[in-house]
Image (cartoon, coloured by chain):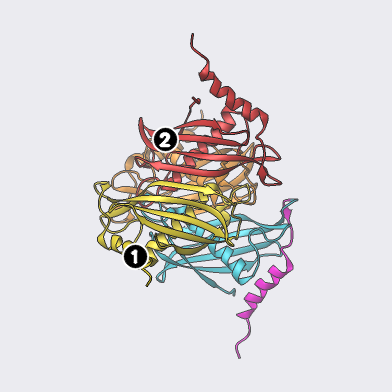
Chain colours: A orange, B cyan, C red, D yellow
Amino acid sequence: MEEEIVFTDKVRIYDTDAQGVVHYAGYYRFFTDAAENFMNEVLDTDYPLIDTDTWFVVVESEAKYFMSAKLGDELMVMLKPKLISEKVLRFDFEIYIKDKLSCAGHMTQVSINKNEWHAVPMPQKVQEKIKALSSKRHKPKQ
Amino acid sequence: MEEEIVFTDKVRIYDTDAQGVVHYAGYYRFFTDAAENFMNEVLDTDYPLIDTDTWFVVVESEAKYFMSAKLGDELMVMLKPKLISEKVLRFDFEIYIKDKLSCAGHMTQVSINKNEWHAVPMPQKVQEKIKALSSKRHKPKQ
Amino acid sequence: MEEEIVFTDKVRIYDTDAQGVVHYAGYYRFFTDAAENFMNEVLDTDYPLIDTDTWFVVVESEAKYFMSAKLGDELMVMLKPKLISEKVLRFDFEIYIKDKLSCAGHMTQVSINKNEWHAVPMPQKVQEKIKALSSKRHKPKQ
Amino acid sequence: MEEEIVFTDKVRIYDTDAQGVVHYAGYYRFFTDAAENFMNEVLDTDYPLIDTDTWFVVVESEAKYFMSAKLGDELMVMLKPKLISEKVLRFDFEIYIKDKLSCAGHMTQVSINKNEWHAVPMPQKVQEKIKALSSKRHKPKQ
């Protein structure tokens, strides 16, 4: 099992549309905020421009909407990182409003050499930190 | 098989991000434009605020990215409508740049009574028009 | 003189465009965040949907750009509220990156009755709280 | 006097917010669309990434809001270019909905060398084309 990391966010007026709730594509802002916070704060890594040669580019995004988020709602955004391969990193997200699931989805990204624009292994320290996160929870309890 | 309808769009500077190409969530703008154009121009229906009582709300969105779209790229956006039930409408999308597939995905939406915020059958004329579109291609060739 | 209130914000990937820096219209997100934070946290008021009858609608926005903000930049956003009349509230903003001015501008908003969509005095408590803020600094030093 | 060029645009669901009308910062999308259309279609020039060395960067933006635009509104966007100097180009905009003024504003941009990030004269052909546009209307009537 992977470690889940929790961030908070807030629905802003520009996230909403004329239906009075968050626009369906607006939830990806919350995914992006959590992804950036995770990489910056937990992995201590720039993102998605990792270093002068390496970028993460998104190859897949998906969201299911269960309960509309409204202006001012305080969001709890859970992120679960999963190292698919040395080149591919997936983030699963769940967004809660007061313990009710509002939205769940994921974003999959590939590490590329930005000059060649082809897939390369992500920096070793990123891989190791993500593995370390997972293993923290995996230690057998004695 | 369902009818595919084709629209054109264009990558704007605000669709792009610091990676120099369209931001992953920006492709949903092209999906939305095509959905609105389809409902407005082909079905002659307001969208997503269908009428004074009925709205379409998105319950699922998804995109896979194959080739990054760049500033100024002319897009061919193909939309394929599919009536899942009398309450649920799915649009599948493919975005092409000069015959190369850039992005494919879908958006699923439910017809709701906006006052009660629960699912209701979509207006009869919307259902019929979508069925009519599909059947156009289904006529047996002789 | 009016009180200045300071908020922090951060440049996100979706704020940037293909020029590698924040898109000119993206700075209004930082203005909006500061405006919402000010109303929510300092005035303890919902915003821009003040109450069931009253909304603030923006009638003027303006920004001058001095130094481009880049992905990940930590922003210091200064907001100075000014009560123009009992119906009109202006916010002046300055955005700093490490003590260098990046952007300055303002947003002017009118209090309206949302059903009639015409200007009305903003709620008394909003007016009073803004006046109280200003007067804090105006007390003659002795 | 300068030539005015007219473009059409349309209010999309993502332009609106929970007030049911276009978000104040959303009008800058219409300004940007008109600016890009003008440069692409009228001046036959890429924009805002003019060529491999030269970019236009916005140094000032401003909008006044007179009548809220609603979902589906067809917009007439008038653009008036003004060459302030060989390095500075200003666009004035007026957005009309069925002959009623909805929004007016401007955007001022400076031509820069993107590598040095300092102001340079914009390409000669851009200057000449804008001058030519203006002079078309200046020919003395006989």
**Which residue lies at the image location 27% right of the left edge and 63% below the top edge?**
D125
Chain identity of mark 2: C
Image coordinates for residue D63, horizontal then vertical, percent: 49, 48
Callout 2 amino acid: Ile
User: From which residue to which does the magenta span run?
Assistant: B117-142
Q: Nearer the viewer, residue A65 or C16?
A: C16
Name the residue at 43% across, 47% down.
D61
Q: Secondary structure at mark 1?
A: helix
Q: Specify few, some or many for label 1: CA neighbours under 10 Å numbering under 14, 14-19, or 20 or more.
A: some
Q: From the image, which quarter does the N terminus of chain D lie in?
A: bottom left
Percent position (x, y) of residue C64? 40, 42
Pair 2/1: label in front: 1
Q: Which residue is at a point 69% across and 64% down the rendered structure image?
A: B85
Q: Which residue is mark 1?
A: D135
Residue C95 - label? 2
As drawn, which residue projects farthest toward the top?
Answer: C142
Using the rendered image of the protein, determine whether residue C14 is visible from the camera's viewpoint. no
Picture quadrant where residue C111 is located: top right
Residue A105 in picture, x, y percent from top left: 54, 49
**Residue D96, percent across and down?**
55, 59
**SS for callout 2:** strand
